[in-house]
Image: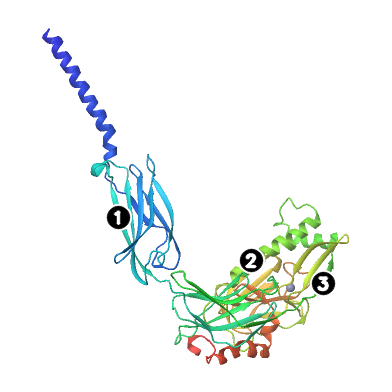
Amino acid sequence: MTRGKSRLWLVILVLILVLLGAGAFYVWPHLEGTPPQIALEKPVSHLGKSNTVFLRVSDQGRGLAWVRVTLVQQERKGVVLNQAFDAPGAPLASLKLAVNPLEMGMHQGKATLVVEAADRSWRNWMKGNVYLKEFPVEVDTTPPRISSLNQIIRLNRGGTGLAVYTVNEAQASHGVRVGDKVFMGWAPWPQQPGTKLCYFAYGDSQPRGVNIDLWAEDIAGNQAQMPLNVKVRWKNFKTDIINLNERFMNIVAARFADQIPTDRQTPLAKFLWINQDLRQHDNAKIALAAMPSQPYQLWQKTLERPLGAPKAAFGDRREYIFNKEVVSRSVHLGQDLAHTERSPVKAAANGIVRYAADLGIYGNCVILSHGQGLASLYGHLSELRVKVGDEVSRNQEIGLSGMTGLALGDHLHFSVLVGGVFVNPTEWWDPHWVQDNVLLRFSEAGLPQPLPLAKQ
Ligand SMILES: [Zn+2]
């Protein structure tokens, strides 16, 4: 009898222990004490008129319960976000915040972006682990001020222009916008850091009548722009007809045999891939290689015209006819010059080698940077005499002419680029054009030529 009773008690005791254990097993994770984590995707130092802030909040325990973001400036407080998360709680939230300090009545100066987040833990009497993080910011809603230092700027279609101007905020980025193309400016006068210049171009692909503006944007994202006083001289380029035949297309295709996609079967399909797809790809690659630059003017007087008789010119339109139909079109973005075979090709000015290798239809190709976004290109070379990173001086031999790439006879293809846009090279060979369109811009602004520091 006593044995039976004590056995019952033992069973009850075990049962209670099991229940307690199960309860603890269930409750314990709900009492986790790790607070949520808060981070900005990109650091924010300044807030302008309207800002997008990317916030990342996560909780590795029971998940997020809510996130609250406020902007605080002295006694003023504006709610940016107040978001609750449904059960079971989000492990991660990527939040895109729109912050408008002016709408919240904030003024210029210091403020704090306060982010609070809570998780779904049962700690703190079910309120969860709350974490608060503060990000100090500077409210700046004043756009930078730009003033032009130039009179009228004349610009040819396909040609180069130069603007000299001031921007009153030191850390602002700035330049010229021509239609949809943005050109970046430079600050090459150390004694006058607010004085800037920007080379820009009326690119061949821009339609007639696009707006040309100076622009600036400060680190708070405030933007300013003003129309630049530019008179554009529109010109029409000539059109050449090129009759295609299978023999010609096969010769061309053989040069790019290892690159042509296998679904291009006929000689015409192969030619079209080279003339259109590859050309576009090559031009984009050139723009990228020609864009990195530095603030000083490495060239002097002019760009040197390479030797040779002028052949195809900048801006020439080409229509390709096959079986009496126009099957392809292209634009020639440089000046061809024919001299003796394998004649020495020389640098048009002092510069830095940005590219020296095969480049599709341009064959063996050298790209030189002459500072402030100006670059020159030498195509179809049979031999390269420089490598990337070399500093070259005006008239230094950089290679030998040839017929690599899409060239059927030995000649030099010479291009000039401004901010990654192909421009008419003949302007840069002409000392009168340089005088009226570059040097005059400096003298009317009362500035010296922006040569490297040692020469200023
Ligand atoms: Zn050419």
Q: Is residue 59 visible?
A: no
- Location of mark 2 (residue): 284
Q: Which residue is rendered at x = 37% and y = 72% of the image?
A: 108
Q: Which mark is residue 376?
A: none
Q: Position of residue 261 (x, y in %)?
A: 71, 53
- Location of mark 3 (residue): 240
Q: Which residue is rendered at x = 70% and y = 82% of the image?
A: 426
Ligand 1 shows up in which quadrant of the image?
Answer: bottom right
Which amino acid does the dot numbered 1 rest on?
Leu
Which amino acid does the dot numbered 3 rest on?
Asp
Question: Marks 2 and 1, Cα distance to the nearest angstrom?
Answer: 47 Å
Secondary structure beneath label 1:
strand
Q: Position of residue 139 (x, y in %)?
A: 38, 69
Q: Quadrant of the N terminus?
A: top left
**For residue 56, above or below residue 167:** above
Which amino acid does the dot numbered 2 rest on?
Ala
